[in-house]
Amino acid sequence: MVPEFSSLLVTGAALAAVLGLLWLAQAGLRRARPLLRPAGARLAIEEAMALDARRRLVLIRCEGQRALLLTGGTQDVLIGWLPGEAQAGPRP
């Protein structure tokens, strides 16, 4: 049995509508992501940089302090805590 052209057209239009709604939902969530984060977020990733195919340097912020992590090797390593924003001013 061969489907009629009108039923194929309706099916294609329904598929396009569902895909369009999914795309709109994704775009809306991407724009609303900063608003969904709690105001008092205690832990956040500030920056990440790939060193090679396995390892990454990650700068995190935890309760106002910043730390540098090396991840992806045989074990993850805390390289150290960085000075806070109030202490990181120009040096004499």
Image: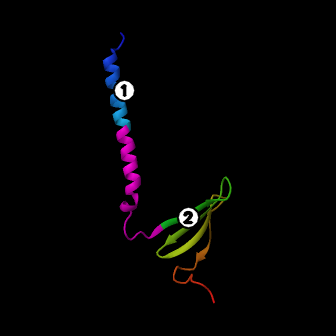
- Name the amino acid, label 1: Gly
Q: Is residue 88 above or below residue 73?
A: below
The nearer-to-camera label among 1 and 2 is 1
Query: Mark 2: few, some, or many residues within 10 Å (few <14, many ≥20)?
Result: few
Taking the magenta stretch, the answer to whether it contains residue 40 is yes
Q: Position of residue 43 (x, y in %)?
A: 47, 68
Q: Position of residue 87 (x, y in %)?
A: 55, 84
Name the residue beneath numbered marker 1: 12
The residue that appears at 60% across and 70% down in the rendered structure is 68
Q: Compare marks 1 and 2 and give the one earlier in the sequence.
A: 1
Assign the N terminus to one quadrant of the image: top left
Name the residue beneath numbered marker 2: 47
**Residue nearest the observer in this picture, 6 or 39:** 6
What is the magenta range?
20-43
The residue that appears at 37% across and 38% down in the rendered structure is 20
Q: Is residue 17 above or below residue 83?
A: above
